[in-house]
Image: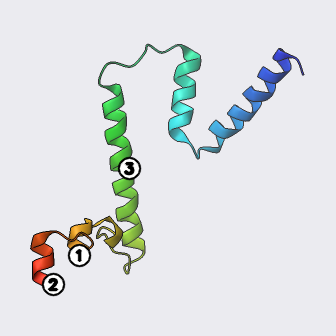
Amino acid sequence: MTEDEMMSSAGACLARIVESGEFPRFGEFLREFLTGVEPPDEHYELRMAVELILDGVAARLESARREPSATLEPAAALEPAAAKGGINTPEIGARTR
């Protein structure tokens, strides 16, 4: 396969991905890349990180709305070990004796 054939094949694959609409951020990135948009400013990465976090929160809230039994509480596995009694410090050990 020549380099031109490879680029043509990759372009067709990327076009299908963008046209599917399943990856809007990738489509936006690709359009900006191909049109030569100026590089992002110094706060771009921070804004994108905040947007991703907010997208995750929105998805979790939507999921909880669709499934009323779903909880928004953090998983018990994320609790500090001391809260579960997993660390034997003098204060915790004294309470269990």
Residue annotated with mark 2: 96
User: 14 and 72: which one is in front?
Assistant: 72
Along the horizontal axis of the image, is 91 left or right of 9? left
User: 25 and 81: which one is in front?
Assistant: 81
* Residue type pointed to by label 2: Thr
Mark 3 or mark 2: name the one nearer the start of the chain: 3
Q: Tell me residue 83's x, y (percent).
A: 21, 72
Element carrying mark 2: helix
Residue annotated with mark 3: 55
Q: Estimate how packed mark 2 is, as few (under 14), some (14 to 19) or many (20 or more) residues with alpha carbons within 10 Å.
A: few
Q: Quadrant of the C terminus?
A: bottom left
Label for residue 43? none
Q: CA distance from mark 1 to mark 3?
A: 35 Å
Mark 1 or mark 3: name the one nearer the start of the chain: 3
Q: Residue furthest right?
A: 1
Q: Tell me residue 68's x, y (percent).
A: 37, 79
Q: Is residue 91 above or below residue 35?
A: below
Q: Is residue 92 above or below residue 45?
A: below
Label for residue 85? 1
Element carrying mark 1: loop
State the count of labels.
3
Q: Tell me residue 31's x, y (percent).
A: 56, 25
User: Residue sitting at 53 percent across and 13 percent down?
Assistant: 36
* Residue type pointed to by label 3: Asp
Q: Quadrant of residue 66?
A: bottom left
Q: Tell me residue 71's x, y (percent).
A: 33, 74
User: 89 and 4: which one is in front?
Assistant: 89
Q: Say how the picture is coloured.
A: rainbow
Q: Are marks 1 and 2 in contact (CB under 8 Å)?
A: yes
